[in-house]
Image (cartoon, rainbow, N blue to C red):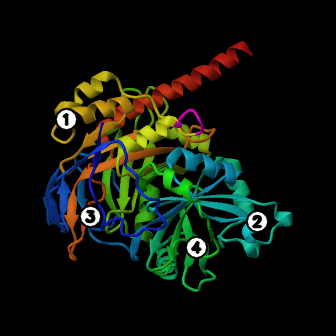
Amino acid sequence: MTSIHFSLSPFFSLNLNAPPRHHHHHRRLTLTLKVQATSSTTQTMGQESTNAAPAHGEFKLVGYKNFVRANPNSDRFPVHRFHHVEFWCGDATNTARRFSWGLGMPLVAKSDLSTGNSAHASYLLRSGELSFLFTAPYPPSLSDPSSAAIPTFSFSAHRAFTSSHGLAVRAVAIQVESAFSAHSASVSRGAKPVSPPVLLSDGKTAIAEVHLYGDAVLRYVSCGDDGWFLPEFEAVDSGIYCQELDYGIRRLDHAVGNVPKLEPVVDYLKKFTGFHEFAEFTAEDVGTAESGLNSVVLANNNEDVLFPLNEPVFGTKRKSQIQTYLEHNEGAGVQHLALVSEDIFRTLREMRKRSLVGGFEFMPSPPPTYYRKLKSRAGDVLSDEQIEECEKLGILVDRDDQGTLLQIFTKPVGDRPTMFIEIIQRIGCMMKDKEGKIYQKGGCGGFGKGNFSELFKSIEGYEKMLEAKVVGKTATA
């Protein structure tokens, strides 16, 4: 069975306790990709020019066909990468174990009673550059707030958050040059402060938070070159378990938020971060006959920190899936996290083995006709054997004028039909920076515009199943 692989070693130069990568029993295909020099361009419908659009201004949704992509390099402060994602939950131990087993992310660090933290239990999972942190509180009557490893932690905020949202993303953390200057620059441009900058015990690492959307926060983390996470966390030696629990997931590609209205949120985020519009879609671009959404993607200068945002549309036959999320989440929040795999076939084989034994289930696969048409759409990139593997594993394939995207979505990961996980692999768009290092251009292959319809149908089918169960229970009551 053939897997897809291309080397991005310069991109993954930060080891960060990544488990060894094992690729036994499967022959690999190394793709020869055209490498381009980095340049700042404007792109319209696959066309590029050097005429950059204005960096800022009031947001106006124009749709995929009329959208002009430009990178004005307008960040308000230096942004390096996604640092980690923190989930707030009622039971950090078992939630972390479930994600560890389901995604192939070993436990690498902890802060809890055993390390002297009586305020909260937090467990860090990591695979490559991807770091997931799970946090739950200890009883406030028995806790010492000064022992918290996350200085921004609040018992009352956690209790209110989990009561409203259940298991959900509290913080999307990005690594910045200085948490102090990033927080100052953000607040001076309208960001709502949540937690002021705090210098941690090592004297190098600092954390600050501002409001993102809903009850989620944007967390700024700055640290020294040797900062592997946060100083109050104790490393966990997982031994052989760490080596075996590796399904090939390597980093966070984008974090998607659902909001009631795009315009105020996009304007708010653009104003204080300086992030620019990277892509957008309307219901006409990506909807089905029954439901739809409007979406815009914001990006930093390097276009490797991506924040897509969705809003519901109304007047369709069915309620928008975004509206369903907003109702069950009791407001705006992080809808899903897109995780990059270095070999999506291997990742999916491992994840599907565990779907019914403590892992994550996936949305229904597309019909056979989808894959019969795939050869004409992507036959120059994927072999017949790989297309067959896509069908076997339920992987969707899309492409734009620059690259190819392979993607698949889990069912909601908690009790509520809210948050889910996307697994992706991007092929193509290899670039060379000024220092001669090779990297992959952010957003290569797009965001699955051609697959939105199939995804919507899967979600609509899942929602119909849930609705039928509820109606059936009501009728027999």
Q: Which label belongs to residue 113?
A: 2
Instruction: Where is residue 263? Give x, y as percent.
Output: 42, 54
Q: Is residue 125 left or right of residue 429?
A: right
Q: Name the amino acid type tagged 2.
A: Leu
Q: Which residue is mark 1?
A: 377
> Bounds of the magenta span?
354-358
Categorize mark 4 by other alpha carbons within 10 Å: few (<14), some (14-19), many (20+): many
Of residue 310 and residue 117, the one placed in the foreground of this image is 117
Q: CA distance from mark 1 to mark 2?
A: 54 Å
Q: Main secondary structure of the magenta part?
A: loop
Q: Earlier in the sequence, mark 1 or mark 2?
A: 2
Q: Name the amino acid type tagged 1.
A: Arg
Q: Name the amino acid type tagged 3.
A: Tyr
Q: Which residue is mark 4?
A: 230
Q: Name the amino acid type tagged 4.
A: Leu
Q: Are marks 1 and 2 in contact (CB under 8 Å)?
A: no
